[in-house]
Image: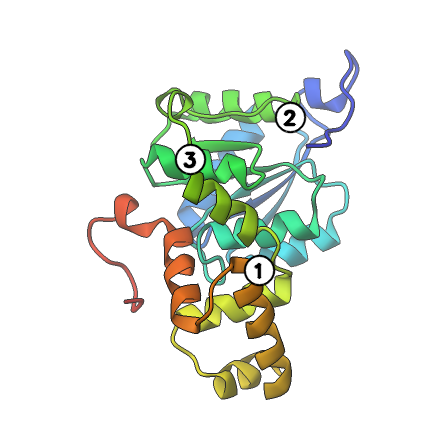
Amino acid sequence: MPMRAQGPDSPMTATGGVSFVVADDHPMVRDALASALKGAFPEAKIAFAGSLSETQAAIESGPETDLVILDLDMPGMLGLAGLAALRAQHPALPIAIVSATTNSAAMRQAIEMGAAGFIPKLAAAERFLDAVRAILSGAVALPDEAKDHSLASKDRDLAQRAALLTPQQHRVLSLLAEGMPNKLIAYEMQISEPTVKAHVTEILRKLGVTSRTQAVILAQRLSLDPVAKPVPVGSED
């Protein structure tokens, strides 16, 4: 993963001059993460986002961004599929996942899909900052409990296939996972039904499946929700 060159006078090694995007749909979590970052990087610039689209907009409006702190469970994300969409758009931008999941395979899968680090939401502030510093220095930050676990070949393959989706295809897949038919997807995205059909065809091809149902099953695997939350949240089946 390309990283900015480091040196003794680099802003990465100082307490300021760093730009972050903190993306989480819970304002209290955003504020807590921002407070921790400001404590360690007093001169840091911090932009906020509460959805995948807002994250994309924040990155576009802040080309100097050094690190994105990204929650997997936000509107539009569809778990790791959202990470794949951001990586496709900004391949050189480091992204650190901050998530409530304790699934070590999920942590490894995030790294396989291009994340620069995975930080548990239950981690202490200093552990969070240690991971941020490591990522800014060019390292990959992964919890100790996930380092000895290798990713199953089927999950590694899924991660690689999902990374091939364009942002538009990712959006279509997320709406498919919500149970929307092509007509409603076209309305939601303000595109034509034939365009939706073309996107669905490409999604099936890239994911290596032959039906919408199979694509949705893979999308649910990417969401990584069951281990993180024993009690279902929201209306998704």
Residue in the image at 48% along x and 37% along y: 33
Residue in the image at 52% along x and 67% along y: 204
* Callout 1 crowding tier (Cα within 10 Å): few <14, some 14–19, many ≥20: some
Q: Are marks 1 and 3 in contact (CB under 8 Å)?
A: no
Q: Nearer the viewer, residue 181 or 35?
A: 181
Q: Residue 172 placed where, x, y %?
A: 54, 71
Q: Nearer the viewer, residue 133 or 175?
A: 175
Report how far apart the C-alphas of labels 1 and 2 lie in the structure.
32 Å
Q: Circle 1 sits on which residue? A: 206
Residue in the image at 54% along x and 53% along y: 162
User: How many numbered marks does the figure carry?
Assistant: 3
Left or right for 146, reference 67:
left
Secondary element under disc 2, as helix, strand or loop, is helix
Q: Specify which label sits upstream in the sequence, 1 or 2.
A: 2
Q: Is 58 situated above or below 140? A: below
Report how far apart the C-alphas of labels 2 and 3 lie in the structure.
19 Å
Residue in the image at 62% along x and 54% along y: 164
Mark 1 or 2, closer to the camera: 1
Q: Residue 54 placed where, x, y %?
A: 59, 59
Q: Circle 3 sits on which residue? A: 107
Q: Circle 2 sits on which residue? A: 136
Q: Residue 43 placed where, x, y %?
A: 68, 30
Please tell me in which quadrant of the rendered image residue 105 appears. top left
